[in-house]
Amino acid sequence: MSDKPLQGFRGQRGEAPLIEEILEIRRNFYALLYRLYVEAPPRELADDLVNERFHFQELRSLDINAELSEGFRLLNKFMEKSKGREVDALHEELVREYTRLFIGPFKLPVQPYEAWWVSGHLLGEPLVKVKAFYRKAGIAKSSEYKEPEDHIGFELKFMHYLCEEELSADTQERLKECLTLQREFLDEHILKWMPAYCDALYAYERTDFYKGIAKLTKGFILLEDTVISDLVESAR
C-alpha cells in the first residue's frame, strides 16, 4: 500500500492526506450510503438525529462540492428539527418514508434501478451488463438480497467492496486493479444514471432527510469522478 500523500486534497490540519486515509474515508462513506438504500433506517439512526450525533466530520476534511454542501445543510436542518423528539416516533416516520420510496406496495415514485434510467424499463440488457461487470470483478449477489443487481444500493455496495479490497491490498498491482475497476464501473454504469436519479429523488421527496441523502449521494459520486482518477495516478 502506498503511503504517498494525495495531492489536491487537504487533511484535518491542512496537509495532503495519505492514500490510505482517502481510501478509508471513501469506504466509510460508501458504507453509510448503501445501507441507507438497501435497508430501512435503524432506530439508532433516529436516536442519533434526535440527539444531534449524525455528523460527517471525516468527509468534511476533503474538498467537497456544492451538492455535498447542500446535502449536509439539509440533514443538519432535519436534525435540528428532530432535536428533542420522541425517538420511536421519528424512527417510525423514517421507516414509513423509506417504505414508500423503496419498497411499495405501490409503484415506486422514483425507480432506483440503472436499467430504468438507461433503457426506460426494468431488467433487460442494462442489468445483464451490470451482472457481467460483477462477474469480471469476481463477485455475485447473495441469495438473501432480493433486489436486482442494478439497484442503487447494490451498486454502491459494490464500490464499497472494492474500497475494502483496496485497503487490504498487499501489492500496488492489486490496489491499482481495484481502483481501475472502480474507474470503469463509475464510467460505464454509475455516472450514466445515478446523478439523474438523485435529482429526481430530490425533486420528488418531501422530507429534508431523503432530500439530503439524494444530494449527498450525487455530490459524493461527482467527487469520486475526480478522486478515483487521482488515486489511480498516485498508485502507479
Image (cartoon, rainbow, N blue to C red):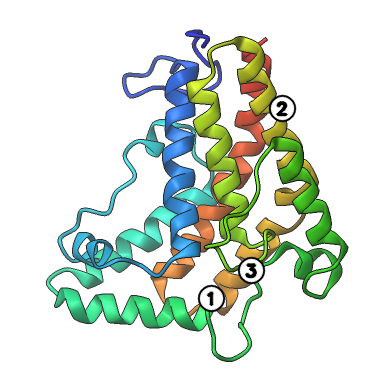
Q: Which residue is mark 3?
A: 112
Instruction: Determine whether label 3 and label 2 are within 8 Å by CB.
Output: no
Task: Name the residue: 47% across, 26% down.
Answer: 22
Could you say whether the residue bearing mark 2 is in a helix, strand or loop? helix
Left or right: residue 13 versus residue 67 is left
Tell me the amino acid under the disc marked 3.
Answer: Pro
Q: Which residue is mark 1?
A: 102
- Of label 1 and label 2, which has the lower sequence position? 1
Q: Residue furthest front?
A: 143
> Could you say where residue 12 lies in the image, as x and y percent from the top left?
33, 24
**Residue 75 seen:** yes
Tell me the amino acid under the disc marked 1.
Answer: Phe
> Could you say where residue 137 lies in the image, as x and y percent from the top left?
70, 36
**Residue 70 seen:** no
Give the number of the disc on residue 180.
2
Instruction: Determine whether label 3 and label 1 are within 8 Å by CB.
Output: yes
Using a 10 Å C-alpha cutoff, classify the residue at mark 1 as few (fewer than 14 neighbours), some (14 to 19) or many (20 or more): some
Q: Is residue 214 above or below residue 24?
A: below
Instruction: Determine whether label 1 and label 2 are within 8 Å by CB.
Output: no
- The residue lying toward the viewer, choosing from 69 and 35, is 35
Tell me the amino acid under the disc marked 2.
Answer: Thr
> Could you say where residue 132 lies in the image, as x and y percent from the top left?
80, 47
Using a 10 Å C-alpha cutoff, classify the residue at mark 3 as few (fewer than 14 neighbours), some (14 to 19) or many (20 or more): many
- The residue lying toward the viewer, choosing from 7 and 231, is 231
> Could you say where residue 127 lies in the image, as x and y percent from the top left?
78, 60
Q: Quadrant of the C terminus?
A: top right
Could you say whether the residue bearing mark 1 is in a helix, strand or loop? helix
Task: Name the residue: 45% across, 50% down.
Answer: 69
- Of label 3 and label 1, which has the lower sequence position? 1
